[in-house]
Image (cartoon, rainbow, N blue to C red):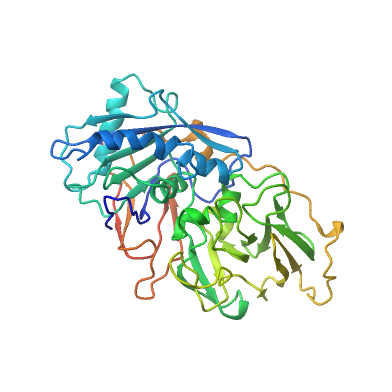
Amino acid sequence: MKLSALGRIALATGIAVLTTATLPGTPAAAAPVKRKILPVLVEFNDASFQFPDKVKASTPDTYFGAKSDSAASYLSELSRGQYTLVPAVPEQFLGPIKLDLNAAGCPQGKINQMTRKELTKRGLVAGKDYESLSIVFPAQKTECPWAGLATLPGPTTWINLYGTASGIDVVGHELGHNLGFGHQGRVKCTGGNLGACKSGGASHTTIMAGGYRPAGFSAPEMIRAGWLNGGASLKVTKSGVYTLRSLHGKGSGVRALDIALGGDRLVIEYRHAAGNFDAKLEGVHAYRVPKGSYGASSLIDTTTADKTATNNAPPNADAITKLTDKASKLSVAVVSSGGGQAKVKVALNGDSLAAIDATPSKSASPTPSATPTPSASASTATEAVTDDSEPVTELGSEELTAAGGRSTALPLAAGGGAAVLAAGVGILLVKRRRNRA
């Protein structure tokens, strides 16, 4: 993956391991979070920033700037103020700090360990003085096959910097991994039949899968983060017609329907241009959530014209009109969509869609689910702040691009208290955790 010095940055492809939390999980708590993040610039024995003054000048803007494309502004707008990044030190970043380490070979594990040791020498305690660590280093000699890497979920990101500044497409993507979001795949379900689906690329409806900054996050990811609360995400328990507000729009209202689908969940959202998001997305979209793991959802695609961030497919190319699942006795149909809201029929337990009155009624609205238990990604008390794990890195020339028809489903392997989430695209390089003295 190459990035020009002018900052044309492709999405990062790294995802990683966190040693203390399993990914299927309950979404995070709804209480507002102010997360202390510490960007640290590091250099090596054989590699330094070509323009260190410009890198130092750009770093505060990248993470905390007032513009909408800073990491703090981006996450605050997406979460409607429920999740805010704040600088861990008055200077907003530290460095450059020179590590006694050569850059060649992309030694991300050693970079992490040695950076944390340097911070300890400076009296900074992980989990107290800073909750997240973002390590920024020059890319010229590292040979790292990614622009960014992150623990998933967890407190660490690595930014392999080309030029003088990174951007939200990389930094925001990696912070999404820290929140527990994997690379979101796409499943092709011909004719809306959920019993006949095949893996088919990346979703492109989220920054986590080729959607870039304007896509923000999808509804399952926002449920995972705990940002759709107070009735914004409703668990459907009876047949009826439900009205959806646009996912990223202002005001109150239902923004996601969460429906049982056997052992999985079906999440329905409505996308429409709002604020800095979704200018190129429109319509009702659906996602399959495996075993309640909202961070590992896949877009359900019933169409043939895949929407990406760079093609000319219409904004509603991936929008659904009807879904059926015989095994779960479930049917979904879009009644209307446009202008900032959508109406969706949901038929449960084999009920007929035709028998449901197309006019929404108060009786059709389910009771909001209770606030879920906090997950490790939002609670610093349960994180592995030492972060000794080796990442699982995905290698490829483009973010989650389908290669040779291979699956982009997100398999989960968890054991011994460790969670690993990897996208089945491109070449996967798995580094096992090393024994340490």
Q: Quadrant of the C terminus?
A: top left
Between 364 and 159, which is closer to the camera in this rendering?
Answer: 159
Q: Is residue 35 above or below residue 337?
A: above
Q: Quadrant of residue 417?
A: top left
Q: Quadrant of residue 175?
A: top left
Q: Can I make out residue 210 in this image?
A: yes
Q: Residue 75, percent across and down?
A: 52, 43
Q: Quadrant of the N terminus?
A: bottom left
Q: Looking at the image, which residue is at 34% across and 75% down?
A: 404
Q: Looking at the image, which residue is at 21% across and 36% down?
A: 43
Is 427 left or right of 280, judged from the image as shown? left
Q: Residue 16, percent across and down?
A: 37, 49
Q: Looking at the image, which residue is at 36% across and 22% down?
A: 124
Q: Residue 281, percent across and down?
A: 56, 63
Q: Is residue 87 above or below residue 289?
A: above
Q: Can I make out residue 435 in this image?
A: no
Total residue callouts: 0
Between 107 and 417, which is closer to the camera in this rendering?
Answer: 107
Q: Residue 95, percent across and down?
A: 28, 29
Q: Residue furthest left?
A: 46
Between 278 and 269, which is closer to the camera in this rendering?
Answer: 278
Is 144 left or right of 212, judged from the image as shown? left
Q: Is residue 121 above or below residue 192?
A: above
Q: Is residue 288 above or below residue 86?
A: below
Q: Looking at the image, which residue is at 35% across and 36% down?
A: 59
Is 269 left or right of 20, judged from the image as shown? right
Between 179 and 269, which is closer to the camera in this rendering?
Answer: 269
